[in-house]
Image (tube, rainbow, N blue to C red):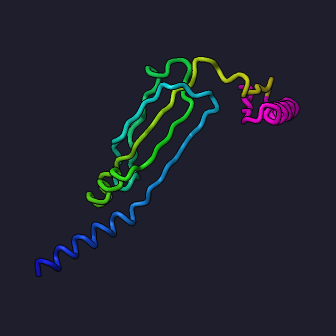
Amino acid sequence: MQQRKILTFILLLALSLTTAGCYTAEVVTGKPASSQTIEKPWATGFIAGLIGPGQVDASQECGDAGVSRVMTQQSFLNMLVTGITGNLYSPMTIMVTCAEGGAMSDNVIRSESRSDEHVKAALQEAAERSQSIEAPVYVQLAE
């Protein structure tokens, strides 16, 4: 009887670990990355991530340069804890990479207005610049 309980526990644990999917989500702003990073390996989430962790305030660490990249993932240990708690507590790892001090002016084309003519010209210029520098170029529309 005791062996059956142990086997049932092991099977339930294995099932919860295999049904907890691992993931990585990354947001890239296009700004060049610096060596300054902010890492929160146990950012608190609940109910299988439906209630996510709060905001990470990078303004003090990154300053005016802003953020280059934000990545969220669920590490093996995060998944293990999520499985043990039955998906009630679901921590994740959040990594923020600050941008270098300079702006990304080489990678941004600003349109003069939101008129079709100006937007089309900005998109054309962005496509040409992207091809020449072999990197993404972003279009910022006038407000």
Which quadrant does the N terminus fall into?
Answer: bottom left
Which quadrant does the C terminus fall into?
Answer: top right
Instruction: For residue 49, say whether it is visible.
Output: yes
Q: Position of residue 24 (x, y in %)?
A: 49, 49
| Residue with the most extreme front position | 35
> What residue sits 22% from the left and 71% below the top?
9
Q: Main secondary structure of the magenta part?
A: helix
Q: Is residue 128 magenta?
A: yes
Q: Position of residue 17 (x, y in %)?
A: 34, 63
Magenta stretch, residue numbers: 114-143
Looking at the image, residue 89 sits to the left or right of residue 50; the answer is: left
Q: Position of residue 44 (x, y in %)?
A: 33, 43
Quarter occupied by residue 57: top left
Closer to the camera in the image, 35 or 74? 35
Instruction: State whether residue 77 is above or below residue 117.
Output: below
Looking at the image, residue 55 sits to the left or right of residue 87; the answer is: right
